[in-house]
């Protein structure tokens, strides 16, 4: 364990700079911030179509209610190997602005060009254009930065965030339309918006994330495929499943007035959602074992002290380490421990992938760069006393 008391703590930690910076990152951040601002303006304008202040307020309010819970779900899944915040922000913006714009433009054009009915547009056209529009973010991310999506859980997280963004903007439009009492809605006003919220916001808030999750899983599996043909086929299959799930959902609403098809589709998708949730939990639990195993190997090499492993792997011990540092040495010490834990997790997962022979862009260089950043923090580390039970190598 590191126990350095001679050097005083700085007023704050130096700003962390990633070991390998991507070209054009600043330009992309500025671009997505601009798109996000445009999305806010568009969302407000969409809510104004409700016609009055009550309808506008209800449309925005009902659309926002599911967001905290949905974000909490994907934050929980993403805790052990957190994805870059800028990519999660970009995913939400892409789903809510770019994907919606692409899908809406294509839907309107195809419906007018081929004189399609509303039912055909909803059941066939919408799934065929909305899912590729959402999945394009994951594909572009995979192509631009393969290290960002490196497994099934990463694919699920990004697919879910894109789906949340898409559903958020789409729901504003649905609530505004139901408030005005269009032909598709039997109720109008606050009752109409509320009834639509019950269906979309309470009983099916995970619909869009679920549809896109099929492609997210496919991209996560494609990462480990060495054959380019296998990666392409896996991605195509995932997209086809995403489109099929979306079509099943929309078709059950469009072509069955009795509601039986909708109930069957709802139950089927519910079972599928449960299966994906179980898969996500299993993968997340497996991450804990991978992290402990990799840290044990790293400790054997002398890169970290074995007594640090519990404070870098298990959430209860990680939290206890940060609390101990803050209570006894102040906020900067706690920040140093938190950053050290984050760097150690990223390094451990990267090291494990390299040891398994997986191709990781700049993998070796990034591993040593992360270790250098960890080493630079060691004079500021203040961990609790070593635990009696130390994680052993697997």
Image (cartoon, rainbow, N blue to C red):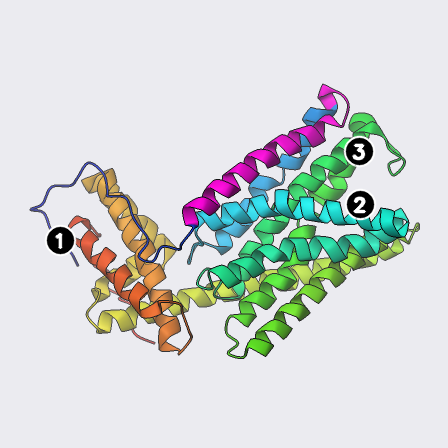
Task: State the residue position of label 3.
Answer: 177
Q: CA distance from mark 2 to mark 1?
A: 65 Å
Of helix, strand and loop, which one carries label 2? Answer: helix
Say if the magenta span includes residue 325.
no
Quadrant location of residue 274? bottom right
Of helix, strand and loop, which one carries label 1? Answer: loop
Q: CA distance from mark 3 to mark 2?
A: 17 Å
Say if the magenta span includes residue 53.
yes
Task: State the residue position of label 1.
Answer: 3
The boundaries of the magenta stretch are 25-54
Q: Is residue 339 above or below residue 277?
A: above
Looking at the rendered image, the disc whose residue lies closer to the viewer, 2 or 1, is: 2
At horizontal 20% and vertical 41% (from top left) the residue drawn is 328
Q: Nearer the viewer, residue 259 or 104?
A: 104
Badge 3 local density, few (<14 within 10 Å), some, or many (20+)?
many
Label whose residue precedes the other's in the sequence (3 or 2): 2
Badge 2 local density, few (<14 within 10 Å), some, or many (20+)?
some
Residue extending furthest left?
Answer: 6
Label whose residue precedes the other's in the sequence (2 or 1): 1
Image quarter (top left, top right, bottom left or bottom right) of the N terminus: bottom left
Task: State the residue position of label 2.
Answer: 108
């Amino acid at each position: 364990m590191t126990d350095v008391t001679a050097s005083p703590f700085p007023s704050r930690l130096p700003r962390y700079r990633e070991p390998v910076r991507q070209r054009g990152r600043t330009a992309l951040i500025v671009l997505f911030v601009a798109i996000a601002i445009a999305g806010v303006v568009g969302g407000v304008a969409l809510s104004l179509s409700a016609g009055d202040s009550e309808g506008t307020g209800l449309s925005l309010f009902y659309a926002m209610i599911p967001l905290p819970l949905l974000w909490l779900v994907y934050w929980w899944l993403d805790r052990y190997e957190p994805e870059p915040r800028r990519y999660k922000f970009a995913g939400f913006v892409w789903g809510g602005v770019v994907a919606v714009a692409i899908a809406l433009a294509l839907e309107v054009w195809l419906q007018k060009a081929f004189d399609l009915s509303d039912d055909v547009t909803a059941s066939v056209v919408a799934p065929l254009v909305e899912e590729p529009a959402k999945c394009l973010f994951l594909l572009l991310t995979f192509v631009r930065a393969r290290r960002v999506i490196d497994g099934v859980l990463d694919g699920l997280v990004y697919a879910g965030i894109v789906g949340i963004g898409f559903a958020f903007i789409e729901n504003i439009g649905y609530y505004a339309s139901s408030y005005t009492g269009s032909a598709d809605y039997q109720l109008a006003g606050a009752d109409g918006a509320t009834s639509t919220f019950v269906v979309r916001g309470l009983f099916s808030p995970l619909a869009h994330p679920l549809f896109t999750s099929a492609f997210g899983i496919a991209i996560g599996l494609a990462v480990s495929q060495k054959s380019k043909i296998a990666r392409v086929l896996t991605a195509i299959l995932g997209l086809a499943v995403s489109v099929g799930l979306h079509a099943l959902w929309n078709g059950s609403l469009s072509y069955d007035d009795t509601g039986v098809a909708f109930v069957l589709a709802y139950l089927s998708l519910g079972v599928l959602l449960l299966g994906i949730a179980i898969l996500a939990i299993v993968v997340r639990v497996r991450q804990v074992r991978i992290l402990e195993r990799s840290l044990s190997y790293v400790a054997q090499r002398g890169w970290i002290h074995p007594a640090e492993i519990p404070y870098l792997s298990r959430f209860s011990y990680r939290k206890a380490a940060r609390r101990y540092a803050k209570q006894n040495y102040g906020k900067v010490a706690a920040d140093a421990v938190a950053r050290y834990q984050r760097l150690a997790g990223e390094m451990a997962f990267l090291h494990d992938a390299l040891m398994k022979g997986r191709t990781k862009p700049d993998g070796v260089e990034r591993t040593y760069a992360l270790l250098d950043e960890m080493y630079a923090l060691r004079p500021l580390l203040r961990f609790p006393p070593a635990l009696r039970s130390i994680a052993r190598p697997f």
